[in-house]
Amino acid sequence: MAIEKTNRMNALFEFYSTLLTEKQMNYIELYYADDFSLGEIAEEYGVSRQAVYDNIKRTDKILENYERKLHLYSNFIVREELINKMQDHVKENYPEDQVLLELIKNIQEIEE
């Protein structure tokens, strides 16, 4: 499995996991975050490997659909880039301005 796909699914899972069913959450977390095989998940839940595969593929599409509609992950990435640029600018041009540095820190904490 491609590392990019795994990273993306883990990120989407972080943003949208509460919108999934408990079974979807469990399968996705085991498969992408914990690196379980389809067979291991099937054994854990007493279902067929095909049932696990179908559930994961369906859930992948659901997560991508949520992102397509809500943009939570892509907006997070853009905000992070802007915050980093802002922080660099302040450190370079206003290194003594503790208020600005504190405000940026507060914004970063909201994002986390």
Image: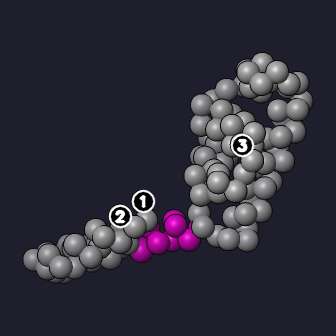
Q: Which mark is residue 109?
A: 2
Can residue 98 be seen in the rendering of this structure?
Answer: yes
Q: Do the CB atoms of the residues marked 2 and 1 lie less than 8 Å apart?
A: yes
Mark 1, residues whose alpha carbon is within 10 Å: few (<14), some, or many (≥20)?
A: few
46 sits to left or right of 79: right
- Residue 47 on image: x %, y %: 85, 25
Amino acid type of the residue tagged 3 in the rendering: Glu
Residue 72 x, y percent position in the rendering: 60, 67
Q: Choose between 33 and 87: the one closer to the eye.
A: 33
Separation of marks 1 and 3 at Cα, in angstroms: 24 Å
Spatial separation of the CA atoms under disc 2 and disc 1 = 5 Å
Visible residue check, residue 28: no
Quadrant housing the C terminus: bottom left
Name which residue lies at 77% across and 62% down.
65
Q: Which mark is residue 22?
A: 3
Q: Which labelled disc corresponds to residue 112?
A: 1
Q: Amino acid at mark 1?
A: Glu
Tell me residue 95's x, y (percent).
14, 75
Amino acid type at circle 2 is: Glu
Upstream in the sequence, badge 2 or badge 3?
Answer: 3
Colour treatment of the image? one colour
Is residue 80 covered in magenta? yes
Q: Is residue 83 magenta?
A: no
Q: Residues within 10 Å of mark 2 (few under 14, many from 20)?
A: few
Residue depicted at x 82% and y 32%: 52
Rendered-image quadrant of the N terminus: top right
Residue 43 in the image: state x and y as whole percent.
Answer: 78, 18
In the visual, does 90 lie left or right of 40? left
Marks 1 and 3 in Cβ contact (< 8 Å): no
Q: Specify the segment rendered in magenta.
A: 74-82
